[in-house]
Amino acid sequence: MVNIKRNVTLNGVSIIDGKTASQFVDSIDSENPTDMTITRYIVDKEIYKPNRQQVNTEYAEFEDIAYELQEEMMKEN
């Protein structure tokens, strides 16, 4: 039997000068919203390195949105 797990996924990107510096991914288990994973990938090191502060600020914004969604989902369960 196939075990299927339903998730909500958010994707975000930090774009600097038209290029993707970093990508953010959040996955929340729909049945158990306390189970959440947030991941950050550096896509272009040459763009990322001199712009770390901006990317980190955007990542913090992404985290805030992810945690708000998680809280909403926990209230619904």
Image (tube, rainbow, N blue to C red):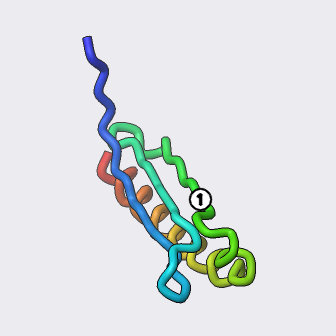
Q: Quadrant of residue 16?
A: bottom right
Q: Amino acid at mark 1?
A: Tyr
Q: Residue at x 62, y 63 (%)?
A: 42
Judging depth in this view, the residue of 48 and 32 nearest the camera is 48
Q: Does residue 75 lie above or below 67 as drawn?
A: above
Residue at far left of view? 1
Q: Does residue 48 lie above or below 35 as drawn?
A: below
Residue at far top of view? 1
Residue that numbered label 1 is attached to: 41
State the image coordinates of residue 69 (x, y, percent, origin top left): 39, 62
Report the side of 52 relative to 40 (left or right): right
State the image coordinates of residue 41 (x, y, percent, origin top left): 59, 59
Where is the C terminus found, in terms of image quarters? Answer: top left
Judging depth in this view, the residue of 76 and 67 nearest the camera is 67
Q: Quadrant of residue 49?
A: bottom right
Q: Residue at x 51, y 70 (%)?
A: 62
- The mark total stands at 1
Q: Residue at x 60, y 73 (%)?
A: 60
Report the side of 28 relative to 2 (left or right): right
Label 1: element kind: strand
Q: Does residue 54 lie above or below 71 as drawn?
A: below
Q: Does residue 68 lie above or below 34 as drawn?
A: below
State the image coordinates of residue 2 (x, y, percent, origin top left): 27, 17
Label 1 crowding class (10 Å Cα cut-off): few <14, some 14-19, many 20+? few
State the image coordinates of residue 58 (x, y, percent, origin top left): 56, 78
Q: Quadrant of residue 31?
A: top left
Q: Residue at x 34, y 50 (%)?
A: 8
Where is the N terminus found, in terms of image quarters? Answer: top left
Residue at far bottom of view? 17
